[in-house]
Image (cartoon, grey):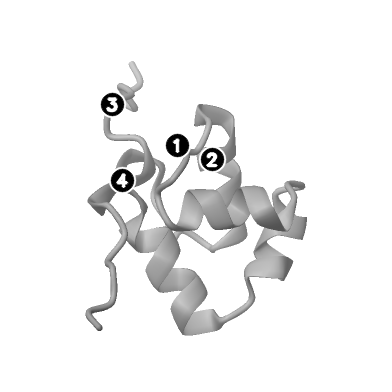
């Protein structure tokens, strides 16, 4: 059976949790439930804009907001 790969927009989040293996800790750091974090990780639900920043900080920059939500304009003036 072939493993499903997550959509491109959540690949960094998937890789981070697969490598560091602590989805529960990451969920606690950004103050969301484990089921919600799992939905984000597998691409079943988009990460809210504000949570993208929190995830970036919680992962020390490994997960980039622009990759989680490429539909949002992250450019600042």
Circle nearer the viewer, 2 or 1: 1
Foreground of the two, 55 or 42:
42
Circle nearer the viewer, 4 or 1: 1
Circles 3 and 2, Cβ within 8 Å, touching? The answer is no
Circle number at residue 53: 2
Q: Residues within 10 Å of mark 4 (few under 14, many from 20)?
A: some
Earlier residue among tags 2 and 4: 2
Q: Residue at x 45, y 37 (%)?
A: 46
Circle nearer the viewer, 3 or 2: 3
Residue position for label 1 = 46
Name the spot of residue 71 as percent of width and height, x first: 28, 26
- Left or right side of 37 for 47: left
Q: CA distance from mark 3 to mark 2?
A: 15 Å
Q: Residue at x 36, y 53 (%)?
A: 10
Circles 2 and 4, Cβ within 8 Å, touching? The answer is no
Earlier residue among tags 4 and 1: 1
Q: Secondary structure at mark 3?
A: loop
Circles 2 and 1, Cβ within 8 Å, touching? The answer is no
Circle nearer the viewer, 3 or 1: 1
Circle nearer the viewer, 2 or 4: 4
Earlier residue among tags 3 and 2: 2
Compared to 56, does 22 lie above or below?
Answer: below
Name the spot of residue 58 as percent of width and height, x first: 61, 58
Circle number at residue 12: none
Q: CA distance from mark 2 to mark 1?
A: 14 Å
- Left or right side of 67 for 55: right
Residue position for label 3 = 71
């Amino acid at each position: 059976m072939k493993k499903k790969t997550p959509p491109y927009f959540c690949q960094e989040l998937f890789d981070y949790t697969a490598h560091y293996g602590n989805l529960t800790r990451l969920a606690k750091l950004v103050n969301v439930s484990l089921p919600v974090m799992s939905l984000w990780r597998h691409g079943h639900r988009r990460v809210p804009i504000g949570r993208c920043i929190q995830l970036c900080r919680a992962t020390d920059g490994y997960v980039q907001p622009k990759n989680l939500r490429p539909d949002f304009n992250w450019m600042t003036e």
